[in-house]
Amino acid sequence: MMGKVVYISVVVALLSVLLGWKVFDLRKRTLASRELVQNHLPNCVPLKNLDNGSEDITILSDGRAFISTGLKYPGVPATEWPGKIFSIDLQDPRMKAVELRMPRNFDLESFNPHGISVYINPSDDTVHLFVVSHPEGKSQVEIFQFVEDDLSLVHLKTIKHELLYSVNDIVAVGLEHFYATNDHYFTNEFLKTTVELFLAQPLTNVVYYSPEEVKVVSEGYYGANGINISPDNRHVYVADVFDHKVHVLKKNEDNSLASLKSVDVGSLVDNIEVDPDTGDLWLGCHPNAWKLFMFNPEDPPGSEVIRIQNIHSDEPVVTQVYEDDGHVIMGSSVAAPYGGKLLIGSVFHKALCCDLK
Ligand SMILES: [Ca+2]
Ligand SMILES: [Ca+2]
């Protein structure tokens, strides 16, 4: 493996020199470094206990929010804080983020939670939380059952598969069934953060997983990242972070996906949340991701939230809802609306709760 790493690195170094760092320039443009305009929402407050990243957030229809914290991800700043899952009852005006109790037999040391998704079991209404985790930099999916009485998680299953090699986010569609994005082609950390970033090729994909069948269902993304599903379960949405687009795919009977179209967002889209009532997409974005990768606290990466309305019409409406230059919140990765409020989470920084009006 090291031989391959050295070989590819030498080739890239030579190419970069020969091309006069054009590859590097291209990546810098793709990663965006535009100046940001402050576009704040009213009454934003940082959520207590959530200062160590809140990469993904999802909210149930009863106001129960789940939040993954403490992500360690190659190439971006990370906290020493261990990986944990928090929850907030948004119907409770105290808005207190509580750490969910984990099962004793679960390896907390290596737990490194990333994308999350919730599935409600139609037969008994139990809440199943799917969590992408990266123990020792690898990828696997942990499935838990949420117990509201004592705010705990019961571990049901760990899923590993050779096609789930660099998972960023998932969307659960059954008890052990989900779609997952692979955000990189390489699994080696050095290759991921250097060679792949600078070469910028559409090598990433979306995988369907079920106990019976695992298959690549969509490919050709520069960086497949957030994934979610429409309220009627007929369409899947995939964020291509490096192509600044959201792709709309039709979910077929056999769980394959058919590409319908893509919508330009003009920012690096991370996670996607879908409003269950309106079908609007809420996107946590990195408006100057270059600053995220070249992190300098004196010149911090900013945050941006974008909403897409009427995505299935001929004229989807793309609106910037929030933007900050990084002095309030750095590296926003997710935005989740509920009852007139908006939760904004970040890769390694704080989480905010704002009023939408
Ligand atoms: Ca997610
Ligand atoms: Ca993500």
Image (cartoon, rainbow, N blue to C red):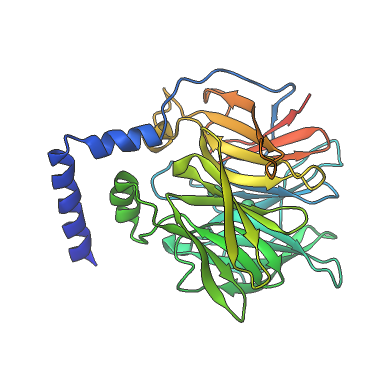
- Can see residue 259? yes
Quarter holding the C terminus? top right
Q: How many marks?
A: 0
Residue 96, x across and y down, in percent: 77, 41
As drawn, which residue projects farthest toward the top?
37
Q: Determine whether 349 is above or below 62 in the image.
A: above
Q: Nearer the viewer, residue 342 or 257?
A: 257
In screen coordinates, is 232 left or right of 264? right
Residue 225, x across and y down, in percent: 52, 50
| Residue lying at 45% horizontally and 65% vertically, measured from the top left | 165
- Can see residue 70? no
In screen coordinates, is 206 left or right of 156? left
Q: Nearer the viewer, residue 114 or 195?
A: 195
| Residue lying at 57% horizontally and 66% vertically, measured from the top left | 141
Residue 180, picture quadrant = bottom right
Q: Nearer the viewer, residue 327 or 25?
A: 25
Residue 255, picture quadrant = bottom right
| Residue lying at 66% horizontally and 39% vertically, measured from the top left | 314
Residue 208, x across and y down, in percent: 57, 68
Quarter holding the N terminus? bottom left
As drawn, which residue projects farthest toward the bottom?
212
Q: Determine whether 195 is above or below 252 in the image.
A: above
Residue 264, x across and y down, in percent: 54, 37
